[in-house]
Image: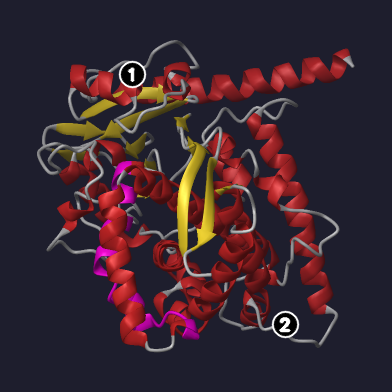
Amino acid sequence: MWVFVLCIISLLVILITSQWLKKRLIYSKYKGRLPPGSTGLPIIGESIQFFSPHSSYDIPPFIRERMSKYGLVFKTSLVGNLVVVSGDPELNQYIFKEEGKSVYCSYTESGFKILGEQSLLAYHGVFHKYLKNLTLTMIGPESLKEALLHEMDAITRNYLHTCSKYPSFDVKEESANMVFEYFGKKLFGYEEAKASKKLRESYKDFLDGMISFPLNIPGTAFHSCLKGRENVIKVVKDVMDERKSSKERHHDFLDFLIEEAKKEETILNEAIIVDLVFALLFASYETSSQAITLAMKFLSDHPSVVVELTKEHEEILKNRGNEESGITWMEYKSMTFTHMVINETLRLGNIVPGIFRGVTKDIEMKGTRIPAGSTVMVCPSVVHLNPAKYNDPLAFDPWRWEGQELHAGSKNFIAFGGGSRLCAGAHFAKLQVAVFLHYLVTKYRWKKIRGGEIIRKPGLVFPNGLHIQISEKYK
């Protein structure tokens, strides 16, 4: 037992020391030419302050205090890495455009180990483009229009109808279950209700574990994530093995990837396929359910927005004729105010706490030097809560988007990242929120029962959920 403990301690010392030495080498080389800031304590840097929970929609205290002192760009040290934090829109856009030149998609060591060393995050240039295009065959606009919209429409209707029979329900939990159920089936034929090994629970600590010290010790979020990953990977691999030994077609994304892997010119292999399925399952339900819950929280507090939203969707029903025929792609694209609500939800909600890029060549811009070997963290909340761009930035005001571009990012709106790494699931998430809102405001009345409080640590969580009660409008 003691031998095991000593081995673990020795490995931790080696890991942390190597990270610290790397940071010190960079710091000594560029001393006096780095952005202002502090690297905090030896080894742990300012990680404790960065991870301190807060319950505000405002810029995180850690970021706000340092930007007040040092400006929009400052240096710090997080989980053993030298990090340059940027809230400067022009620098952020430059960083996004430099993808594949002087920067690459990066994450913490824990993030890469959890998502997989063969995941979409790990590839760059033409390989990343190839894998992203494969992903878009499932969740890109054309696939959404031709296939997924119909299924998303049907299951959303069914879920809301079922939830209307409950005394109350947690929006975050039920919307996550909803997306997990149909997306798991579309990905690799997985059905949670019928499976002997439940996978939703395996993802429960991922938000905490993605940005954390990579300490694989029982009781840590990182350890829990690795165990969860192990469970999911085993199920996906078992399904793959069954598919390979059978001629039966399932017409899902895994079938498509297996056939793609047979082509001579492909880079696709089993490890990449497994990591791709693993990450897509998590990203699809977590982002969508968070956005739906945030939207419901804001709508519950702003009845005038609900009135305008209802008006738009009742007009869609009026023009449709057959109310039960389901949402069409043309109707979805016509939901102007709905997209304003979604954009405002994402702007104020700031689901993603930071967007990370590794630096391979020194970057100099606007008097700022970012050295090779460091990491840049683009901070969306600083951009989205900039009073110079958004009047009264902490107010939920969908009308501020009137006349603005609603379907693309910009230097002042980076909810889905930017550049060639713009989130592949952006269209999927926005469509799911729109479909949910359509059926909610046209078919149901609702009231908030409890919950809705948020905690950022730094990922967004709803510690008490958001419990609402819904009832059919027309019975």
Residue 91 appears in which quarter of the rendering?
top left
- Secondary structure of the magenta portion, mostly? helix
The residue that disc 2 covers is: 250
User: Residue at coordinates 72% horizontally, 82% vertically from top-left?
Assistant: 250
How many marks the image carries: the answer is 2
Residue 254 lies, with reference to residue 2, above or below; the image says: below
- Residue designated by label 1: 28
Location of residue 180 in the rendering, given as x and y in whole percent from the top left corner: 63, 60
For label 2, count other residues whose C-alpha is less than 10 Å away and answer few (under 14), some (14-19) or many (20+): some
On whether residue 346 falls in the magenta region, the answer is: yes
Residue drawn at x 28%, y 58% as measured from the top left? 307
Disc 1 element: helix
Q: Is residue 226 magenta?
A: no
> Distance from label 2 to label 1 (Cα)?
57 Å
Residue drawn at point x = 52 percent, y = 82 percent: 147
Span highlighted in magenta in the image? 324-348
